[in-house]
Amino acid sequence: MSRFLLLAVCLYFLLGDNYLITCSLIIVIWVSDLLDGYFARSRNEISELGKIIDPLADKLTVISLVIILLWKGIIPTWYVIITISRDALILFGGLYLNYKKNTVLQSNWLGKITVFTIGGTIFFAIFAKGAKLGQFGNYLTYHNEITELLYTVLLFMSVVLAILSLLSYFQRFKEIK
């Protein structure tokens, strides 16, 4: 639940063009997600509700951030369409399986790598914009090409992974359905 609150604060700073605090909050959100999963598994406190809320928090975070980044002209429309379509299809497929088969389709390693890469893409899109505006110091303002190159590589890498992971989820959905 703390990630929902952190997301609201993050979106506030992103809308206010404070990219340094936004990047810091994204790191906090990411670390809290990792710690939440780690402690739930290590204490064997994995619940059916947690299996639903955790990916929902991830999807809400990604969708909210990419919509605002699109609105601000930081990321391209086609990327937002691919990202949101992937998340929506996985979410609705998961809800269908939960309703029809009382089964929760957990993420697999490809899905986790994809979400990590999408998160990195979002982070570096924001970081590159902040660096361009001088919010991370003069060095990055003048040498922003490194962060922009990393953002571009992650952008295309995350699209390929999004398509592959969607196909993987679809295959698993067919097997269970």
Image (cartoon, rainbow, N blue to C red):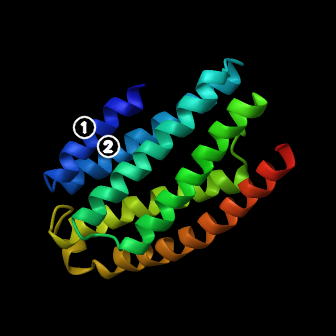
Q: Quadrant of the C terminus?
A: top right
In which quadrant of the rendered view does residue 48 lie? top right
Q: Residue at 59% x, 31% y: name it.
A: 52
Q: Is residue 136 left or right of residue 66?
A: left
Give the structural element (helix, strand or loop) at label 1: helix
Identity of the amino acid at label 1?
Val
Q: Residue at 15% x, 56% y: name it.
A: 17
Q: How many marks?
A: 2
Camera sees residue 93: yes
Packing grade of label 1 (10 A; few <14, some 14-19, many >=20) is some
Q: Quadrant of the N terminus?
A: top left
Give the structural element (helix, strand or loop) at label 2: helix
Image position of 44 with respect to 137: above or below: above
Picture coordinates of residue 16 (x, y %)?
13, 51
Camera sees residue 34: no
The disc at residue 25 is 2
Identity of the amino acid at label 2?
Leu
